[in-house]
Amino acid sequence: MTKPLICMTLTGKTLQENAELAKKYEKKCDIVELRADCLEEDEQLYVRRFPSMVSQPTLLTIRRDVDGGKYTGSEFSRTSLFGRALAFANTDRNRNFAYVDFEEDFVIPGIQDAALAFDVRIIRSVHNMTGPIVNLKERASKMLRTGYEIPKIAFMPKTLNDVLNLFREGEQMKNDHIFIAMGNLGTPSRILSSRSNSYLTYVSPDELMTNLKGIGQLNPNVINDLYRFHSINEETSLYGITGWPLLKTLSPEIHNQGYIGHGMNAVYVPVRSEQVSETLSFADELGIKGLSVTIPHKESVMYYLSEISEEALSIGAVNTIYKENGIWKGCNTDAGGFRQALEEFLSVNKLKRKKVAIIGAGGGARAIAYVVKQMGGKACIFNRTLSSAKELAEKYGFDYCELSPSCVDKLEAYSDLIIQTTSVGMNAEGFSSAENDPIYFYNFKGHESLFDIVYTPATTPVMRRAFQAGCRTCNGLKMLQYQGYMQFKIFTGVDYKNAESE
Ligand code: ATR
């Protein structure tokens, strides 16, 4: 089996635009795919020139709309376009397309013969843009028209089990093949091609990503610099993060930078799943050694663990799982990460005589209430749903109150330190409003310290308002980093350092 290659998909409107991007990412991809279906009609007349315009080997694809492409013309005109692209083969192979993608049902012997005669390798493809394809091995061998073709199967998984099946079947295949699971669930199949024995993985430059929305391609910088695609091999230790929908996460940056800093052969990948039980089966089969666990699995994962730390049990949530002696163990580094960030922010390690308001009573608030109690603070939990505020407060002997304008006096009474744990200000730019500021009705006096566990944006609307009133504020970035560093130590046994710490 050869080592998997990186193929950059080019969906620009002109050959020139595509060639410029091929140049820009020259060192970050091994092959470039010209998606001729995305070219302007006039440009399509000149596809034959493209291989001479770039330095990488080229793949020609003219994808029909039914297969997720933009080609809406007749099969006759598509066939002519293939003919035009493959004709007049040059004696210098670099000036010809190195690969051509023909769909499973595209059978035009003249064109196929031309490809074979000129040494253009055929990728024989099938796509399901709306659901999984199973029995991949069998399907792959049925698709092939000649022994020289590379079967490509790309599908949209419905669950992580569909992605696991791709690895299972790919691992057993000795012949060249390309297996891709698309969408957010499919990310591991795009990064861990060496584990599915896939001939290549597809990436797309950010400049053209909008043309490929939803299929889940990574960009060439991320696959090279963050995931170190070409150095992933049999010996690479695998780690990851699981959650759902897990749209944005900084954890791969934190952990992968740590492996780079230590020169470790390890990679950390997003393993999205709606069911945490599927994550565990996936991790068991692929040999993943440790996972960060995030929304909504922090509680449900506990059911599947053989050992849970006392702290995590007491908090009632696990954010870190790792395999030791063949069993899954769990602990919670959110509490430790929060404590370290808070101590730095306030320059104290006790909250004696401090009156603390905790806004929210969800997963985040649980680890925070635990720390506030540990540090000796007196707190009141404010939450939209009173029953969950009550439940959490009673666990630690705290006060509680409904989060609404009527709680303003109570909030004032607990305003030495205000800790915002809800998702309300997340991704909210602009001025404070009832929609993006959970305590919009409260006027900061200037003496309050505000800790918001949100980190995107770096300044949430409530933080801006507090800052303008003269308060000290802190966002959740340090908390995220510290909990990640603690996980890193649990996963690898060594203290965190990244490439910049050198
Ligand atoms: P997490 O695990 O990230 O804390 P969670 O468990 O869903 O996520 O908790 C989210 C918290 O944000 C809860 O306290 C939730 O209040 P409810 O218990 O009433 O649901 C709070 N929250 C979410 N959206 C909110 C909104 N629009 N206004 C006020 N509170 C909100």
Image: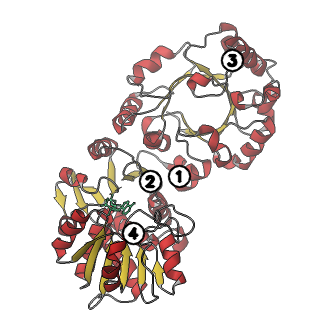
CA–CA distance in space, label 4 to label 3? 52 Å
Q: Residue 502: x and y, percent? A: 53, 74
Could you give the CA–CA distance between mark 3 and mark 2, rounded to whole angstroms? 38 Å
| Rendering coords of residue 106 (x, y %) | 60, 13
Tell me the mark number nearer the camera, choosing from 2 and 4. 4
Q: Earlier in the sequence, mark 3 or mark 2?
A: 3
Which corner quadrant of the figure contains ligand 1?
Answer: bottom left
The residue at the point 47 percent across, 60 percent down is 250
Q: Find out if the beta carbon at label 4 lies less than 8 Å from the nearest ligand 1 atom.
A: no
Q: Locate residue 322: give its quadrant.
A: bottom left
Q: Is residue 34 above or below residue 85?
A: below
In terms of sequence position, does the residue under pointer 4 or pointer 1 come before the other?
1
Secondary structure state at the residue bearing disc 3: helix
- Toward which corner of the image does residue 74 lie, by quadrant? top right
| Residue at disc 4, secondary structure | helix
Contact check, label 2 and label 1, Cβ < 8 Å: yes
- Of the image marks 2 and 4, the number of the one nearer the N terminus: 2
Residue bearing mark 3:
115
Q: Could you tell me the amino acid type at mark 1?
A: Arg
Does the CB distance between marks 3 and 1 fall below 8 Å? no
The one nearer the camera, 152 or 344, is 344
Mark 3 is on which residue type? Ala
Label 3 with label 2: CB-CB less than 8 Å = no
Rendered position, 434 above or below 44: below
Tag 2's secondary structure?
strand
Q: Is mark 1 within 8 Å of ligand 1?
A: no
Frontmost residue, 83 versus 206: 206
Q: Amino acid at mark 2?
A: Val
